């Protein structure tokens, strides 16, 4: 197949942009290629094709030998950590005596990359030398590549976008993990904004498919976006499954120390090329601020390039896609020390400890948790989807317990600490965590407040007055005290509210105060009346006044224990 798509490429005999070809090997294995430019001037296009590729076919011409651009490609492979591939020495018909020499040279140059042990083949496309061996070797290499995750969240870097008459917008990319199906809804993350799109149809290697599994070249016919709104470097992702970040903490994997690097550079990841600002912490760790948001996670590999140059500066690996803000003097040094201790697989407990509390779904988005159910480390508590560091949880309990006890000591009649005040006090990320914290701190919750367990029985200075009120009402259950009598006992609204929270009194409308047992006593008396009964009959049966009888009857109505039939009659609900 001819991968040079543009007339200028064919006219000049020079690959300028990405090309695409595919074939079926003798074993029956299908394989697709992304042909990248070799010339230094088009390194940006080369890196876009290389970024999503899991396997590399490294080509060196026998008659030209190792070139400057070969070194750029070597550095890019090393930066991306690609470990699977083969070395192919071509054009041996032009220099038949140099094939073994150039292969040895290529092996020496690739010795510090993941292709150090890659098999090598010497071929000529003109006379057919080595082509059968090339097919066999390629088949063997592909057989050794680990099986991709078919159920993984999707991240497809767009390398082409065009329109087809009658079909609409089509994008292409390399599907390295996950599965695509017609009708799937995806998020398109572009330089300007994110949008939702739907897959209308799928193709791979020129044929339609209802679903596509990795690893494969994929063409997606999209609904919901025009072709001029999508560009190389945009990304199609599983909705709500990836973080979108502009700030990364990195570890250098290849290249010169970062203390020597320029502050402004270009970052290549997937098919994207994004300007960025580098803040070195030391030779090997730095913070990178991107000009646009990208869906990057722990372990992702990046290529850093000098702006306006074809030179590769080096490679980096993401250690944190959601790093802490650095505000105070010395934060950079402290962050560098923390990054030195991090590994590329992530330390979930350390990340939870840094944040105090984080949702499990966010840990998954950051790449810190594998698929399926995850077991929290011993030092982490799991609460309603939140992972909370044990030390943070203990500090929350102690702080809440101390403040609630202090509040009760100052004012035993207080409702307690409101949930809003408690959230502000502890700076918990979600109010749903307060219930567990209060319970485990030995506190109780009631009516939107948190208070000491057992504090409801302590009415402080109002205790004696409430006891006297209780004694009066026990003698005459429906003889509610008048306002001046309550005033004489120094029982105002605040004291009575505290007594009601403690279950000591029942407050009805119009300032009527009875014991909590009053409704049950009233029902016994009312059940003995001929049904239905009038308000006057109820008042006489209870031995009380209309001031007390009417609020009490309304209380019973509201709870479904009596039923009002008309303006003057009620009946007991049996």
Image (cartoon, rainbow, N blue to C red):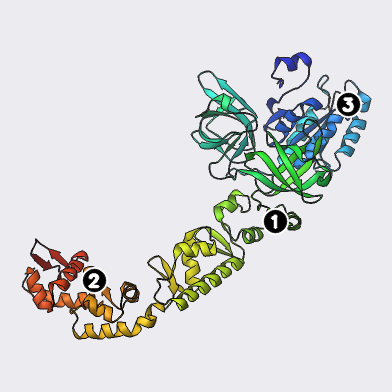
Q: Looking at the picture, does residue 375 appear above or below residue 297?
A: below
Tell me the number on the disc at residue 62.
3
Residue drawn at x 80%, y 30% is: 310
Q: Looking at the picture, does residue 187 appear above or below residue 283?
A: above
Circle 1 sits on which residue?
A: 328
Which of the 4 quarters of the picture holds residue 113?
top right
Q: Residues within 10 Å of mark 1 (few under 14, many from 20)?
A: few
Which of the 4 quarters of the picture holds residue 444?
bottom left
Q: Is residue 144 visible?
A: no
- Residue 164: percent from the left, percent from the top? 55, 20
Q: Looking at the picture, does residue 10 appear above or below residue 438?
A: above
What element does badge 3 sit on?
Answer: loop
Sooner in the amino-acid sequence: mark 3 or mark 2: 3
Q: Residues within 10 Å of mark 3 (few under 14, many from 20)?
A: many
How many angstroms separate mark 2 from mark 1 (CA)?
57 Å
Sooner in the amino-acid sequence: mark 1 or mark 3: 3
What element does badge 1 sit on?
Answer: loop
Residue sitting at the far left = 530
Q: Is residue 248 visible?
A: yes
Q: Residues within 10 Å of mark 2 (few under 14, many from 20)?
A: some
Residue drawn at x 62%, y 59% is: 352
Sooner in the amino-acid sequence: mark 2 or mark 1: 1
Query: Which of 8/65 is in front?
Result: 8
- Residue 198: percent from the left, percent from the top? 50, 33
The answer to whether 311 appears left or right of 552 in the picture is: right
Please identify, in this view, whether the residue under mark 3 or under mark 2 is nearer the observer.
Answer: 2
What element does badge 2 sit on?
Answer: helix
């Amino acid at each position: 197949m001819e991968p040079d798509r543009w007339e200028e490429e064919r006219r000049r005999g020079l690959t300028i942009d990405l090309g695409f070809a595919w074939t079926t090997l003798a074993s029956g294995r299908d394989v697709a290629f992304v042909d990248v430019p070799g010339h230094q001037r088009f390194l940006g296009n080369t890196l876009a094709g290389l970024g999503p590729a899991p396997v590399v076919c490294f080509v060196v011409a026998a008659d030209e030998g190792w070139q400057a651009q070969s070194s750029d490609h070597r550095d890019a492979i090393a930066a991306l950590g690609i470990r699977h591939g083969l070395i192919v020495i071509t054009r041996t018909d032009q220099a038949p005596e140099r094939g073994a020499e150039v292969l040895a040279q290529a092996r020496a140059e690739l010795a510090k990359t993941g292709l150090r042990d890659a098999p090598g083949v010497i071929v000529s496309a003109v006379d057919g030398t080595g082509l059968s061996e090339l097919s066999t070797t390629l088949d063997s290499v592909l057989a050794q590549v680990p099986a991709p995750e078919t159920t993984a969240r999707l991240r497809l870097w767009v390398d082409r976008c065009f329109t087809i008459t009658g079909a609409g917008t089509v994008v292409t990319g390399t599907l390295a993990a996950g599965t695509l199906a017609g009708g799937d809804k995806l998020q398109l993350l572009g330089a300007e904004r994110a949008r939702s799109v739907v897959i209308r149809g799928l193709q791979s290697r020129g044929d339609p498919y209802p679903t596509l599994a990795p690893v494969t070249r994929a063409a997606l016919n999209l609904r919901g976006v025009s072709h001029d709104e999508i560009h190389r470097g945009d990304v199609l992702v599983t909705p709500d499954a990836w973080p979108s970040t502009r700030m990364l903490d990195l570890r250098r994997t290849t290249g010169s120390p970062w203390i020597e690097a320029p502050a402004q550079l270009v970052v290549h990841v997937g098919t994207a090329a994004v300007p960025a600002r580098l803040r070195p912490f030391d030779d090997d760790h730095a913070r990178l601020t991107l000009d646009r948001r990208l869906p990057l996670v722990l372990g992702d590999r990046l290529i850093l390039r000098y702006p306006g140059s074809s030179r590769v500066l080096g490679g980096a690996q993401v250690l944190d896609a959601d790093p802490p803000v650095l505000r105070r003097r010395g934060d950079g040094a402290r962050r560098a020390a923390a990054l030195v201790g991090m590994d590329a697989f992530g330390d979930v407990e350390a990340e939870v400890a840094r944040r105090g509390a984080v949702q499990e779904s966010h840990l998954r988005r950051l790449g810190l948790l594998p698929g399926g159910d995850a077991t929290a480390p011993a030092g982490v508590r799991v609460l309603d989807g939140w992972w909370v560091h044990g030390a943070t949880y203990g500090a929350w309990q102690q702080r809440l317990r101390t403040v609630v006890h202090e509040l009760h000591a100052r004012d035993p009649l207080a409702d307690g600490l409101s949930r809003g005040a408690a959230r502000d006090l502890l700076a918990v990320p979600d109010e749903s965590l307060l219930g567990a914290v209060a319970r485990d701190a030995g506190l109780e919750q009631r009516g939107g407040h948190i208070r000491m367990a057992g504090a409801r029985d302590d009415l402080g200075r109002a205790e004696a007055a409430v006891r006297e009120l209780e004694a009066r009402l026990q003698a005459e259950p429906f003889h509610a005290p008048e306002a001046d009598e309550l005033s004489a006992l120094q029982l105002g609204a605040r004291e009575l509210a505290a007594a009601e929270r403690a279950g000591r009194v029942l407050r009805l409308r119009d300032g009527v105060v009875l014991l909590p047992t009053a409704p049950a006593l009233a029902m016994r008396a009312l059940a003995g009346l001929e049904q239905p009964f009038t308000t006057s009959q109820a008042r006489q049966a209870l031995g009380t006044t209309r001031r007390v009888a009417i609020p009490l009857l309304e209380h019973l109505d509201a709870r479904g224990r009596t039923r009002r039939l008309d303006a003057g009659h009620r009946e007991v609900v049996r």
